[in-house]
Amino acid sequence: MIVVTGAAGFIGSNIVASLNEAGRTDLVLCDRLGSDDKWQNLRKALFADFVFPDELTSWLAARSDVEAVIHMGAISSTTASNADEVVETNFRLPVRLLDTCTVAGIPFLYASSAAVYGDRESGFGDSTSPQTIAELRPLNLYGWSKRQFDHLVATRAASGAPMPPQWAGFRFFNVFGPNEYAKGDMASLVAKIIDPVRRGEQVSLFKSERKGVADGEQRRDFVYVKDAVAVVLWVLANRAVSGIFDVGTGEARSFRALATSVFAAVGREPLIGYVDMPETLRDRYQYYTAASLHRLREAGCRHAFMPLEEAVAAYVDGYLAAADRYR
């Protein structure tokens, strides 16, 4: 069986959906559902068991039939401020899982983030050695916590310390797609503006605070969630592959282009305005991100990522315009 943590979250629930579509229902899901609509991400899911996060390491230690642990659970908000909670969830828990999987001989795949790169405008994908990871300067607590765990994993691997039979970290770039609705402010621009766009209203993007960058021309590597999941499952299926990989299209596109794609998907002319960036974001805002696909291609993954316009149209037509938006 396969264990998926953060199973009711955005990427986690899409991994569950893809595994179900591949005929896998021998899944053990790990998350906390709370009292809101987060459970809706799993409404269509089929699974064999459900374990809460504080029970997982002891549950794993007592099993001999776990094929892999796919650890997607995290506090993923880039504006999170409770450092103790972030360290416990994003660092200490994955360390315990890494240790447990090492002892039990279970493959361990985990979510990292492009937030580890901070305000770089080049050099994405080259930071997988302990030394280069240590030199990264994330802009927020979330990115810092992911860098710390990447560094620990890379240090152990480089030193020849015991590791799981397969291990992989995925530095997800700006992922968007179905089941992101519980993310609130962390949801993609596509999910945030689709309803105003359909009503024919103007949508607002941030003005630029950087010389040489026009309003709305801040650029990110936007990747459709089904592509991100395909990379994770490709690595899972290729047990000789281990490492830390960027997961994105390799192309930086502007927020203006993203918003324009949403207007095009519903057949409307773009109507875009600009507002000041909040003070709280100005010193932690990434103006440019683009994945490097070098390590992924070198490992043998040839997955073709959907172009931005095609991915936005697939998201809008297949989910956001449907009566049931959930995958």
Image (tube, rainbow, N blue to C red):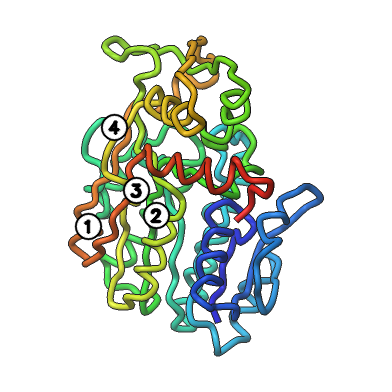
Up/down of 73 relative to 23, above or below: above
Left or right: 300, with 55 as reference point? left
* Residue plotted at (38% across, 13% down): 215
* Residue located farthest toward the right when viewing the structure as drawn: 35
* Residue plotted at (49% across, 74% down): 22
- x, y percent for residue 222: 39, 39
Which element type, helix, strand or loop, lies under badge 3? loop
Quadrant position of the N terminus in the picture: bottom right
Residue 238 figure quarter: bottom left
C-alpha distance separating marks 2 and 3? 7 Å
Task: Point out the tag, 4 or 1, that comes first from the N-terminus.
Answer: 4
Left or right: 14, with 29 as reference point? left
User: Which residue is labeled 2 in the image?
Assistant: 227
User: Which residue is labeled 4 in the image?
Assistant: 120
User: Which residue is labeled 3 in the image?
Assistant: 306
Which marked residue is nearer to the observer: mark 4 or mark 1?
A: 1
Tally of numbered discs: 4
